[in-house]
């Protein structure tokens, strides 16, 4: 397995974030490996790709105008780390959600994702 390049890191992350903000579930699925595992610190449960896509659909039902801002990415062994702020409009007012995600990548697809955020800010 060769090391991920910065260009590959940005391509994979940009494809994922673009698909998420566009609410394009099939495009999100294409970025994930079929058996990818998605974990969040707030529930400490590993989600399947299908479960994660359902979570993203729910997110779009609860908030609009979603955008990732203040994006910073760093290569890490087997993948990369991204810090960002997710902004948008939720029913209760503006959404401003700082987060950090650790990605593991193999063959150009995300095999594991661990997202850290404070749901009290959502």
Image (tube, rainbow, N blue to C red):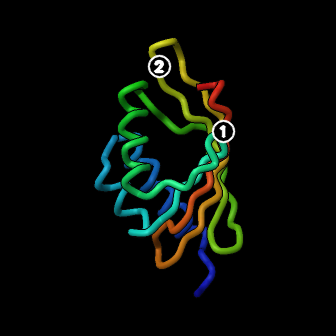
Q: Position of residue 92 (x, y in %)?
A: 51, 12
Return the residue nearer the eye: 109 or 120. Answer: 120
Tag of residue 117: 1
32 with respect to 39 (left or right): left
Write the residue at 55% across / 55% down.
46
Residue 32 placement: quadrant: bottom left
Return the residue nearer the eye: 81 or 5. Answer: 81
81 with respect to 26 (left or right): right
**Of helix, strand and loop, which one carries label 2?**
strand
Image quadrant in which the N terminus is located: bottom right
- How many numbered circles are shown? 2
Alpha carbon of mark 2 to alpha carbon of mark 1: how far? 17 Å
Write the residue at 41% across / 25% down.
62
Q: Position of residue 50 (x, y in %)?
A: 37, 54
- Residue 98, compared with residue 95, is above or below; it is below
Write the residue at 47% across / 65% down.
36
- Residue 23, compared with residue 50, is above or below; it is above
Write the residue at 51% across / 62% down.
37
**Dot placed on the residue nearer the N-terminal end, 2 or 1:** 2
Tag of residue 29: none
25 with respect to 83 (left or right): left
Residue corresponding to mark 2: 90
Q: Position of residue 53 (x, y in %)?
A: 38, 48
90 with respect to 53 (left or right): right
- Residue 48, compared with residue 72, is above or below; it is below
Q: Residues within 10 Å of mark 2 (few under 14, many from 20)?
A: some
Q: Position of residue 48 (x, y in %)?
A: 44, 58
Q: Residues within 10 Å of mark 1 (few under 14, many from 20)?
A: some
Image quadrant in which the C terminus is located: top right
């Amino acid at each position: 397995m060769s090391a991920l390049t910065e260009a590959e890191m940005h391509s994979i992350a940009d494809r994922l974030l673009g698909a998420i903000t566009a609410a394009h579930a099939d495009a999100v699925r294409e970025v994930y490996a079929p058996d990818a595992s998605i974990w969040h610190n707030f529930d400490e449960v590993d989600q399947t790709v299908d479960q994660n896509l359902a979570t993203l659909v729910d997110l779009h039902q609860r908030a609009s105008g979603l955008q990732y801002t203040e994006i910073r990415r760093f290569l890490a062994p087997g993948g990369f780390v991204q810090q960002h702020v997710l902004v948008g409009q939720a029913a209760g007012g503006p959404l401003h959600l700082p987060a950090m995600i650790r990605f593991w990548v193999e063959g150009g697809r995300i095999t594991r994702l661990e997202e850290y955020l404070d749901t009290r800010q959502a």
